[in-house]
Amino acid sequence: MPCDTRIIAEPNGLQRVQAAIARLEAALAAGTVSIAISAGGAIAFRNWRDNGGLSDLCAYRRLAASNSPALRRALARAEALAGRSLNPQAIAAGVHSHDGGQTWGSH
C-alpha cells in the first residue's frame, strides 16, 4: 500500500506495521479506541496512541482490506452516532485527522 511503503522499507518495518494494525484491531474490539467520522465522511481513530508511525487513513485501509469484524462493528457504531456514513471519496482523497477527529485536512 502506498501509505505505508516508507515504514515498510525500514528495518523490521513490515513487522512494525503488522503489530500496530493488530493492536488497533484489538483496541477497536475492546472499545478502547473509537472511530470519528468528519462532516465530509473521512475517518480518524480516537485514543489510538501506539500507531507505530501509521496514519489513521492507512490503518483504516489495511483493516478494511482484511475485512476486519472489529472495524466493521466500530464503523457501524460511529456512523450511527455521527448520523452520517463513511465517504469513499473522502478516503480516496486522503482526508484525515492528526488529532483524533478535532481537525481534518489532506496534505
Image (spheres, grey):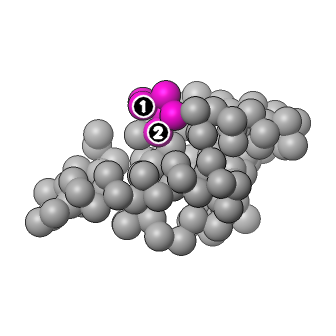
Q: SS class of the residue under badge 1?
A: loop
- Label count reads 2
Residue situated in front as seen by the camera: 18 or 80: 18
Few, some or many C-alpha atoms within 10 Å of disc 2 (few <14, some 14-19, many ≥20)?
A: some
Q: SS class of the residue under badge 2?
A: helix
102 w.r.t. 38: above or below = below
- Give the magenta-colored segment's residue range: 63-68
Few, some or many C-alpha atoms within 10 Å of disc 1 (few <14, some 14-19, many ≥20)?
A: few
Residue located beneath label 1 in the image? 66
At x 84%, y 43%, the residue is 82
Residue 64 within the magenta-colored segment of the rendering: yes
What label sits on residue 80 in the rendered view? none
Which percent across, then down, holds residue 87? 65, 31
Residue 32 within the magenta-colored segment of the rendering: no
Which percent across, then down, holds residue 67? 49, 28
At x 51%, y 34%, the residue is 68
Type of amino acid under label 2:
Leu
Q: What's the CA distance linking mark 2 and mark 1?
A: 5 Å
Residue 9 showing in the rendered view = yes
Q: Circles 2 and 1: CB distance less than 8 Å?
A: yes
14 w.r.t. 76: above or below = below
Residue located beneath label 2 in the image? 63
Quadrant position of the N terminus in the picture: top left
